[in-house]
Image: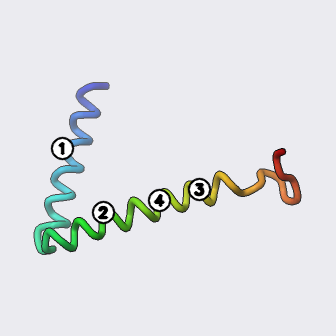
């Protein structure tokens, strides 16, 4: 399990390096912030949707 997690981290690091190689650092930072905000908003939207149409928890 540990080796698998380590392998995934290495793959992710190589992927991030490849993606960011031609992008200025400031643009990368802005993209990461925007992605973080988008994911937080999406999670918030999902949490606030009723599980059953017309039903809202009290």
- Mark 2 or 1: in front is 2
Question: What residue appears at the point 83 percent right and 53 percent down from the top-left corner?
Answer: 52
Closest to the observer, 57 or 20: 57
In the rendered image, residue 45, in percent from the top left (x then y), is placed at 62, 60
User: Marks 3 and 4, how far apart in space?
Assistant: 9 Å
Q: Earlier in the sequence, mark 1 or mark 3?
A: 1
User: Marks 2 and 1, how far apart in space?
Assistant: 19 Å
User: Marks 1 and 3, how far apart in space?
Assistant: 31 Å
Q: Earlier in the sequence, mark 3 or mark 2?
A: 2
Q: Which residue is mark 3?
A: 44
**Image quadrant in which the N terminus is located:** top left
Crowd rating for badge 1 (residues with CA inside 10 Å; few <14, some 14–19, many 20+)? few
Q: Which residue is mark 4?
A: 39
Q: Secondary structure at mark 3?
A: helix
Crowd rating for badge 2 (residues with CA inside 10 Å; few <14, some 14–19, many 20+)? few
Q: Which residue is mark 1?
A: 10
Asked if the residues shown at circle 2 and circle 1 are in contact, with their CB atoms under 8 angstroms apart, the answer is no
Instruction: Judge left or right: residue 45 versus residue 21.
Output: right
Q: Earlier in the sequence, mark 4 or mark 1?
A: 1
In the rendered image, residue 58, in percent from the top left (x then y), is placed at 84, 45
- Furthest residue toward front: 58
Closest to the observer, 31 or 21: 31
Crowd rating for badge 4 (residues with CA inside 10 Å; few <14, some 14–19, many 20+)? few
User: Marks 4 and 1, how far apart in space?
Assistant: 23 Å
Instruction: Judge left or right: residue 45 versus residue 53.
Output: left
Residue 2 vs 31, above or below: the answer is above
Q: Which residue is mark 2?
A: 32
Asked if the residues shown at circle 3 and circle 4 are in contact, with their CB atoms under 8 angstroms apart, the answer is no
Q: Secondary structure at mark 1?
A: helix
Question: What residue appears at the point 17 percent right and 66 percent down from the top-left corner?
Answer: 20
Instruction: Judge left or right: residue 34 versus residue 43.
Output: left
């Amino acid at each position: 399990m540990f080796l698998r997690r380590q392998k995934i981290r290495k793959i992710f690091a190589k992927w991030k390096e490849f993606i960011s190689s031609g992008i200025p650092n400031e643009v990368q930072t802005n993209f990461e912030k925007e992605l973080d905000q988008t994911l937080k908003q999406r999670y918030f939207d999902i949490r606030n949707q009723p599980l059953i149409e017309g039903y809202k928890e009290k």
